[in-house]
Amino acid sequence: MKLQKHIKTALILSAIGLASCGVKRENVLKYVNPNIGTAHSRWFFYTPAATPYGMAKLAPSTNGSYGNNQGWEAVGYDTRHNSIEGFVHFHEWQVGGVSFMPTAGELKVKPGDLEKPGSGYRSNFDRKNELAEPGYYKVKLDDYNILAELTATKHVGFHRYTFPQNQQSRIILDIGNVQGESGPVDDALIRMTDDTHFEGFVKTYPKYFVQYDPQGRVFMYIYGEISKKPAKVGSFTSAGIQQGSNSASGKGAGIFMEYQTQDNESIELKVGLSYTSIENAKLNLQAEAGKLSFDKARRLAQETWQKELSKLYVEDANVANKTKFYTGLFHALLGRGVASDVNGSFPRHDGAIGQLPKDNKGKFSYDFLNTDAIWGGYWNLTQLWSLSYPQHYNNFVHTQLQVYKERGWFGDGIANSSFASGVGTNMVGLAIAAAYNAGIRDYDTDLAYKAVYENEMGWKNRKVGAGKMDVKAFVERGYSPFIGGTDNNFITDSTGSTFSASHTLEYSYSAFAAAQMAKAMGKEGDYQKLMKYSNGWRNLFNPASKLIHPKDLKGNFISNFDPNQAWKGFQEGNSVQYTFFVPQNPEGLINAVGKQEFNDRLENIFINSQKNGFGGGKTIDAFAGVSSLYNHGNQPNLHISWLFNFSNKPWLTQKFTRAICDEFYGTESIHGYGYGQDEDQGQLGSWYVLSALGLFDVKGFTDLRPVVQVGSPIFKRTTVTLGNGKNLVIETENNSAQNVYVQSARFNGKPLTSCWLFRDELMKGGKLQLVMGAQPNTAWGIVAPPSTQ
């Protein structure tokens, strides 16, 4: 979809939500284009008909029924496809299911092949007849001349299908087949309970459960109502069609409802969702949507999006940058959906139903989440959460503590309380320590510290799904030894790992975070011990090459070492990229390399990587940049452009963060987040948002007293509603695409001569003013932030 066309269509939105914001503000929804980056996008990426962090995330699927052999591959909706096979309700990391499709004419109960029109019930469509907005989606299905519309509340999906005159109109409820990342279907049920109500469930076995949590399963439950009684009902399974049957069970289960429709006749469905039971799906429907029309649900969803997106309110004439900003923020607030019900029920790993506690006001103080791994999230999501959305951070911490209480360990990626790590490591302890140090402490902090410490130091009876299976080697040696694997057969055990070097760097960083939490809580002995481990990176630093170099079990640097080779010692990256992964002690790394060489090397890396789009060039593949010098399309690199603030050349941070925002990020369906890169539930979008604000912390708020570094804000004026209710205004003077360098700065009227300030000072609110120019001011901001605390 063309940017200008999208904005023109979006202008039809009314100024929703403005009165509830209390001030006259522009409707920012018109700057969100969900279709950006939808080539090679992940299962959970494209879900326009949803509310922030909702359970109900409705979206069209072009190839979700094809499944996902590796568990992480792009599947679901792709801008390069021209047919839709259904509208799916559940979209999370390792979770997908429940597809509905309106059709007409000959009965077909399989979606058919993407490349074979007419082979199933899928329909061609034209993107000129498609509209995607936050909280709403519509498209015309050309094969049937049916207009499909979707919207949602937190737990309820809404459909409105407008049919032509037809004696064979139909709605298919396809429940028992694979969708996206769900993995194989173990069991399913769908049945009509009366003329206008239906219920069912699907049970799946995701790919990453097989590896990380074999006993785990995902249950998805529905209870729905339809606005018109069908003329007749039939069912189907993988065994075939049963006319006149109103129920089906097992693999391939589904039902179809037949109608005789008049021209422009609309039929609406409301579908309550739950991960715990059909009863709770029904309760969610009644509580949120019992008397709610489709149009009212859409208005409420979009009011919610306006309120949440406007917490970062941008004033600027550059439409493309505002589109990147608000689309990035949209994705940041879309991922990691709620898994608990309106009554506080949530799914436990053992199949039982857990219950959230109520606060002293009788309300549930947090939501239980399904969440992708937080790997790399400390350089985007957690910083954004702690700035303006602390409740989401609180939800994440509570979810992980609940899992810890049930399972004995944190899980990096979580699907219905089961471990679905994906990366085989675990940075949850770091994220929770950072929450504590950022003042987000609305949880049992003693329990949190116990869990954080064990995550860093514990290995006895450690579950595979908890990741860090080589932590024993790290604790005993101060580094993880390299164990050779083969393609797609990577090894991590108590003696070491195929990803030994990147694990050593990660564990060193997370040990530092835990150490700062220990110090804040007066645990001096633990602090000293953990700080020793935070220097583990030094054990792999090769003074000859001044690179991180994996060591073997005997303590020798491995031979046949190529610093550009990915996957050998380094997960999803290489030595050139990972050598900069010492965020806990930038000064230590700079001194080890030598400041001049450090700056020259890093600047040359960015100069050269800029020629390749700061990643994998125009190759549409999530791992296109893993062998490059710098790869903005993946997590391990996302702090590197900010390291110049620590090496006394902050103008280079200003230069290259702006260049990345301008060139890596796009406003097109193919070039949105690089070319087909891995957005991971809002991580790359969050990075753009933070860099556009000109605020970032290399250390991910893991310091005892966290620090915020200043970069090159993109916009003329931004008003940030902080999580504590105060406002921070960021203003720039003489800002433009060429004027990217900070000439001078003031914070609350006083000169700011450093390129950083303490986070607690920033959170008091006020005004940050920066004067920009076309040439670097090499005298401003050259005093580095504190490197260790």
Image: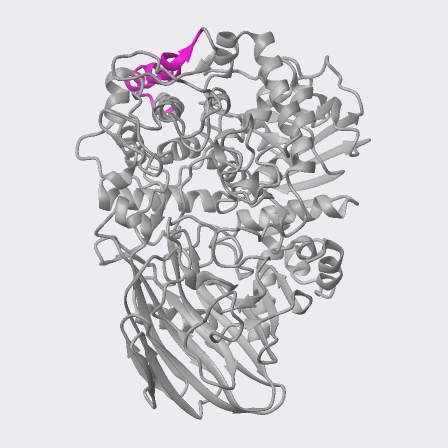
- The quadrant of the picture occupied by the C terminus is top left
Determine if residue 140 is in view.
yes
What residue range appears in magenta?
A: 520-543
Depth check, front residue: 35 or 279: 35
Q: Residue furthest left?
A: 461
Which quarter of the picture shows residue 459?
top left
Q: Position of residue 770 (x, y in %)?
A: 74, 27
Which quarter of the picture shows residue 90?
bottom left
- The quadrant of the picture occupied by the N terminus is bottom right
Which quarter of the picture shows residue 552?
top left
Q: Position of residue 79 (x, y in %)?
A: 59, 57
Q: Is residue 559 above or below residue 37?
A: above
What residue sits 36% from the left and 26% below the top?
A: 503
Asked if residue 539 lies in the magenta stretch, the reply is: yes
Determine if residue 724 is in view.
no
Depth check, front residue: 560 or 728: 560
What residue sits 65% from the left and 19% below the top?
A: 650
Q: Is residue 304 above or below residue 732?
A: below
What residue sits 67% from the left and 17% below the top?
A: 781
Q: Is residue 242 above or below residue 67?
A: below
Asked if residue 273 lies in the magenta stretch, the reply is: no
Q: Position of residue 283 (x, y in %)?
A: 37, 71
Report the magenta stretch's main SS.
helix
What residue sits 61% from the left and 76% below the top?
A: 142
Residue 526 as seen in the image, left or right of residue 644: left
